[in-house]
Structure formats: C-alpha cells, structure tokens
Image (cartoon, rainbow, N blue to C red):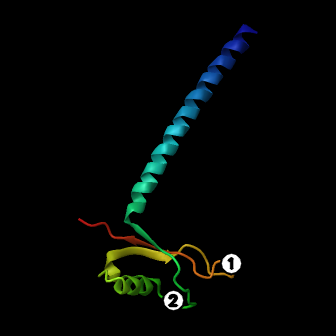
Amino acid sequence: MVRLQSENKELQRTVQELKKTTSENQEAINSLEQYGRRECLEIKGLAWSQHENTDKVVVATAKKLNVNIKKDDISVYHRLSKCNKDNPRPTIIARFVPGE
C-alpha cells in the first residue's frame, strides 16, 4: 500500500511537470507563430475569379494603394479558403520576402 501511494505521488509530480512544460511550449509556439506572421499581409474583400492569378491580384491591389511592390517581393500568396456561397470573397494572404 505504501509503495502504491509513493508511486501515485511520483506520477502526480510527473503530470504536474508535464503540464508546466506543455504550457511553456504552447507559449513558445504562439510566440514563434506571431513572429512568422510579421511578414504576412491579409487582403480581404477582393472578388474571386475562377482563373485568377493571385500574385497579379496582390501586385495590382498594392498599385491601387500607391504601394510599389513586385512579384519578387512576395514569397507566397494564395487564398485562405475556397470560394463558395457562404464565402464569395475569401481572404488572400501574401507572405513577403524578408528585407535585409
């Protein structure tokens, strides 16, 4: 009986340590995700077309806002979801090439 109680206490300590580590890891992951998003831009409300070229849409939108960017300034661009009746204008996300 004493051995079982001792094992139980040790397991409870281990669980508490694992909970603490998990919480710390979640905070670190969140911080890294936020850091990674600093080079991203979300563009909302633009109409979707079946054969659209997302990079041209992003560059043209920037041009309309008097922002001079080129296709090479962006490393990745895509719609975040599919266009459907509930979401006729899905968000575009553009990840810019990090500056020096």
Question: Mark 1: which secondary structure?
Answer: loop
Is residue 43 left or right of 62 when viewed as pictured? Answer: right
Is 42 on the left-hand or right-hand side of 47?
left
Report the residue marked by disc 2.
Answer: 52
Instruction: Work out which residue is located at the far left of the displayed protein and give it.
Output: 100
Residue matched to label 1: 86
- Name the residue at 41% across, 84% down: 61
Residue type at mark 1?
Answer: Asp
Above or below, comparing residue 33 to residue 47 in the picture: above
Residue 23, image x, y percentages: 54, 38
Q: Where the N terminus falls, by quadrant?
A: top right
Q: Amino acid at mark 2?
A: Glu
Disc nearer the start of the sequence (1/2):
2
Q: Which-is-in-front pick, marks 1 and 2?
A: 1
The quadrant where residue 65 appears? bottom left
Q: Quadrant of the C terminus?
A: bottom left
Q: Residue furthest front?
A: 65
Q: Residue at x 31, y 83 (%)?
A: 66
Element on which disc 2 rests = loop
